[in-house]
Image (tube, rainbow, N blue to C red):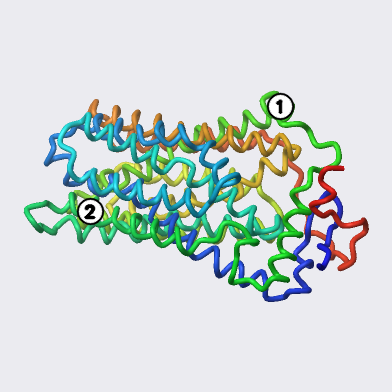
Amino acid sequence: MREPVITGGNHVTSAAFSEFPGLRRKIAWRVLPLVFVLYIVAYLDRANVGFAKLRMASDLKFSEQVFGLGIGIFFIGYLILEIPGALLVERWSARKWFARILISWGAISSLTAFVHTPMQFYVARFLLGVAEAGFFPGIIVYFTHWFIRADRARALSGLVMAVPFSLMLGAPVSALLLDVHWLDLVGWKWLFILEGLPAVALGIFTFFYMTDRPRNAKWLAPEERDYLEDLLAAEACPKPGAVPVGKGIWQALRSPTVWLLAFGIFATNTGGYALAFWLPTTVKHLSSGSDHAALFYSGLFFACGLFGVFISGQSSDRTGERKWHCVGGQVATALFLAGSVIPGQPFPLVMVWLCATGFAAYFWPSPFWTLPTLTLTASAAAVSIGFINMLANLAGYLGNHFYGWLRGHEATDTTCLLFLAACYLLGGILISFIRVHRERPAAPQPLTPKHEPHTTKDCHH
């Protein structure tokens, strides 16, 4: 059995794969495409209510406040199983857990087509959140089973790109579905049904196709399985002087950095989730156009977001700078949103502002999620990421509920968009106070370890 390459601090470098030069590519092509598709479907089923609203609201006589609460209550359900879901991936089976998630959320999403009352709508959205809970943190844990730290950031950036991609794709597809009328069901009902069924099919496929861990991978050679397991085990060994979990929680909650990160993303996501879910309605009001036009313009917004994610990842990785990439994206989103409500502009110019907003609104998340690991000790970072992510999702409830309340009280589009801009600006200001040392490119590492390599046997010493 070959020994993994360690550079100190239990960190395995990519140079370790020099003995199996094709192994990293083989893993990436087996794991990432499926996860990317799963997250596309997940985010579309979460957000397609914003597309369906263009017809659903008038058919069911739902007010803006009803929609705001219904959209937001998803995040309350989502919070319930978020941490247990991640633990199940670690201790039970990613394959079985993700299959359960996909099948249940696909079924609930499709059944949303048959709601008639606000209470039924609230229950459906709450159950959808419960069904999908644990998916994103579970994916993060799943990546630790397959990718060493040096490769994990790029894998995560690919996952983030699925968010604007799913909405960019979902907008034109939803526009087509709104006009169908099959089996005495109107278009928005078919939108929920047909966009929910792929999750059920993918859940069945995932059960048979996904591999929990390298030791279960029949598509790897035995020596590749053993080598990868050793690499991952070496990184999993506790570092010298690691803080116990209980102390790690206390250390995290005592840290001003954790609170700045948590409240920074809470403020930003209060505006960000509302912007994503209410965009088709807002664009329709601003353009005075048709439902189809509103969804087409929304698709342009999310297409610009796709470029934002890509360029942000490339730039921040190349320069090693994270904080100001994040702050720059947040502040730019606020400024572009404010620019879109300048009085007297023709709608094409408003749309230019909104496309710039889309680019900036998806520019900041990737660098943001590197900040906990750059500013905190490893033990505090592990705990704080869960805490920060809980506030990030709670913001989805608050932002959508409050935005619906604003629209229900006859607030103008200008007022609503300025509220979103203020959320982004506040988030950027909070993150700007974080102290972080700029990353420097790592020096080339020798292929022979400076210290004796760790193996799973060493972890108990």
Q: Quadrant of residue 452?
A: bottom right
Q: Is residue 93 above or below residue 241?
A: below
Tag 1 and tag 2, C-beta contact below 8 Å: no
Is label 2 in a helix, a strand or a loop?
A: helix
Marks 1 and 2 sit apart, C-alpha to C-alpha, by 46 Å
Q: Quadrant of the C terminus?
A: top right
Closer to us: 41 or 47 = 41
- Rendering coords of residue 210 (x, y %): 51, 61
Q: Position of residue 150 (x, y in %)?
A: 71, 58
The quarter of the image holding the N terminus is: bottom right
| Residue at image mark 2 | 191
Q: Quadrant of residue 262?
A: top right
Residue 270 seen in the current view: no
Which residue position holds label 1?
246
- Tell whether 20 sits left or right of 73: right
Residue at the spot 72% in from the left edge and 75% down from the top edge: 21
Picture residue at 16% right of the left edge, 46% below the top: 55
Q: Measuring 35% from the left and 32% from the top, which residue is drawn there?
A: 73
Amino acid at the residue labelled 1: Gly
- Please, is residue 76 above or below residue 12 in the view? above
Q: Is residue 249 left or right of residue 448?
A: left
Q: Which residue is at 76% across, 52% downward? A: 235
Q: Secondary structure at mark 1?
A: helix
Q: Which mark is drawn over residue 395?
A: none
Q: Is residue 424 above or below residue 110?
A: above
Instruction: Of the two numbered discs 1 and 2 on the same chain, state the one appearing first in sequence.
Output: 2
On the picture, is 427 further left or further right than 256? left
* Residue 320, x across and y down, in percent: 71, 55
Camera-side residue of 288 and 455: 455
Circle 1 Cα neighbour tier, 10 Å, few/some/many (<14 / 14–19 / ≥20): few
Number of marks in the rendered image: 2
> Which dot, 1 or 2, sits closer to the camera?
1
